[in-house]
Amino acid sequence: MAALGASLLGLLGTFLVTIVGEAAAAEVVVSQGKPTTSSSDEWAGTPASAATDGNTGTRWSSQFSAGQWIKVDLGSAMAVSRIDLNWEAAYATAFTVQFSTDGTTFTNATSSLRGNVGAQTIPVAGTARYVRLNLTERALSLYGYSLWEFQVYAGGGATDSTLLSYNKPGVASSEQNDVNCNPCTAAKAFDLDPASRWATSSTTGWVDPGWIYVDLGATAQISRVELQWDPAYATAYRIQVSPNASNWTDIYSTTTGKGFKEVLTVSGSGRYVRMYGTARSGPYGYSLYDFDVYGTGGAPNTPPARPADPVFPATRLVFQDEFNDPAGTRPSTAKWTYDPGFPQNGEVQYYSENSNNAQTNGQGQLVIEARKEAVNGRDYTSARMNTGTKFHVQYGRVEARIKVPKGNGLWPAFWMMGADFLTGRPWPYNGEVDIMEVLGRNTGEAYSTLHAPQYNGAGGYGQKYATVDLSQDFHVWAAEWDSKGIKFLLDGNQVFYATKATVEATRGPWIFDHPFYLILNLAVGGDFPGPVDGSTPFPARMLVDYVRVYQ
C-alpha cells in the first residue's frame, strides 16, 4: 500500500536501525553511462549504450546470429570484482566475460557460462579498462541476444580505503530548517542515514555558490568521494581539500553533473573535504542525502555493522504462521497485531478488530474478509494486521501463499514497512516494500513496488506484471532481499529485480538496509483500485495459507 495510517504508531519499544559499515571498500558500479559498443544492434532503438544506462526499461539487442559481443570502456584500468546482467528472453546459453587493458587484446576472465532470463551475477577478479561479453550460443535461435542491463562493479575486496566522514562535523554555506526540511543540517550528509539530507537555506541559499565540507579530524589521503544527490543537485561543482578550512585545492571538477549517485575517484590530501557547487540544476539550492569520503588517515568513527547477507535459497526459518488453528480463531497475538482505524488512499472501509474480519477457517488458512456493514460511519469493514511490535527482519526471503479475491474496488496486499515508522519517522522516509498488490478489477496482473522519499506513490519504483487469473488459486509471492537489492518472485519466477546500484543511480537513495515488519490487508475502494459497484461480491475474502521468513 502506498501510505499508512498514524494508527500503526502503536506501542512499539525501541528498535535500532542497522546500517552499512565500511571495513572494506564497497563495490560500486563503474560502467554506468560509459562508452559501450557492440558487434551489432538489432535497430536504432536498442543500441549497446542502453545496456549501461542504468535504465531497466531500455535494452540492447543484437542482430539475429550467434557470434556477437558487447563491450564497455570503463575509462581507466581498475580492479573489476563483479558483473551483473539482466537478460531478456533472448539470453546467451554460452558466453564468456573477457578483460582487456587496450581494447584490442582480450583474455577470458571466466570459463564458458550459461545465462538465464532475468538477473545473473558473475563474480570476477582482475584488472581491466575494457570488459566484453563474448556471446556464442543463443537461447532463441530465431533471434539474437538482448540485455536490459550490463553492469560492471569494482572494489569490494580488502583495501586500505576506509570511510572517513561518518559522523564527523560538517559545515555548510547555509542550512534549511523549516516545515519542508526539518532540520536539513550539514550533519545529515555524514550520518549514513540515506533518508536524511542537507539542504541550503530556502530563504538565503538558493544562490551560487553553495558548499558543504567535513572535518575528518586529522590529515587524510583521499581516494574516493561518493555523493547521493537530492533533485536539487549541482551541474557544476568541485571537490576540494584543505589543511585548515581556509585555503582550498581542487582535486576534482565537473560542469556536467547529472545528480543521483556519483562515485568519484580522486587523489588529494587534507583534513577538510568540500563540495563547492557553482551551478544548480534548477531554481532551488543544493541538497545531498550522503557525502561520503574514503581514504586513509583522518580520525574515522566506526560505523555500525550490518547483518550478513543471506545465501539464497535461504533455509533458516525465522518466522512462520501456518494458520492451522481451529475455525474461528483470531490470528496469534504472539505474532500479529490488529491495526484498526480509518484508512488512507481514498479507501472506503473501516479496519475493524472484529474477529469476523480476520480468522482461521479450520483448513489451514487465514481469512481476511471485507464485509458490507456499517461501522464508524463507513459502509464496509475489513482487516489490517501487522508484526510491528512482534517481529522485524532485515534481509532474507519473505514469502506468503495467498489467494486473492476478484471484484471491482478490492485491493489485497502483502507488504512491509520500515520499522522506524513506529518510532516516529514519517512515510515514505522509513521505506515501504510492496511484495504483492492486486486490483480486484483485473486479477490477471499484479504489482511489486518500492516507495522512498524520491520515488513513492504513483511514482514508486516497481513493476506491473501480467499473469494467470490470480483469484482462481493460491500463489506464492516472495521477496529475496539483501544489501545488493530485492528480487520479487511469483511462484518461483522472478518478476522484478530492484538493485541498489540501479536505484541510487537512476531514482534516489536506497533506504532498505534496516529492519522492516510485515503487513497483510484487504482494502475496499480507493485511488488505486477504483470504486466498488453492484458487481463486487461481499463478503470478499483474501485467503492466506502461510507467511514465512527465511534467512
Image (cartoon, rainbow, N blue to C red):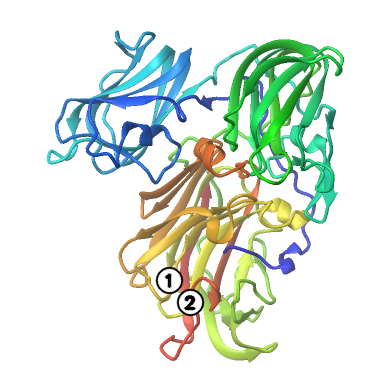
- Specify whether residue 85 is in view: no
| Rendering coords of residue 364 (x, y %) | 46, 69
For mark 1, what is the residue? Answer: 404
Residue 329 vs residue 444: left or right?
Answer: right
Q: Could you tell me which secondary element the residue under label 1 belongs to?
A: loop
Give the CA distance from mark 2 to mark 1.
Answer: 9 Å
Q: Please give the name of the residue rendered at 48% of the width and 77% of the height, measured from the top-left corner.
A: 410
Q: Please give the name of the residue rendered at 76% of the width and 23% of the height, measured from the top-left corner.
A: 274
Identify which residue, 163 or 322, lies in the foreground.
163
C-beta proximity under 8 Å, tags 2 and 1: yes
Q: Quadrant of residue 163?
A: top right
Label number found at residue 410: 2
Label number found at residue 313: none
Residue 65 vs residue 424: left or right?
Answer: left
State which quarter of the image contains the N terminus: bottom right
Identify which residue, 363 or 123, lies in the foreground.
123
Identify which residue, 306 or 271, lies in the foreground.
271
- Identity, as a three-letter code, of the amino acid under mark 2: Leu
- Identity, as a three-letter code, of the amino acid under mark 1: Val
| Rendering coords of residue 221 (x, y %) | 72, 10
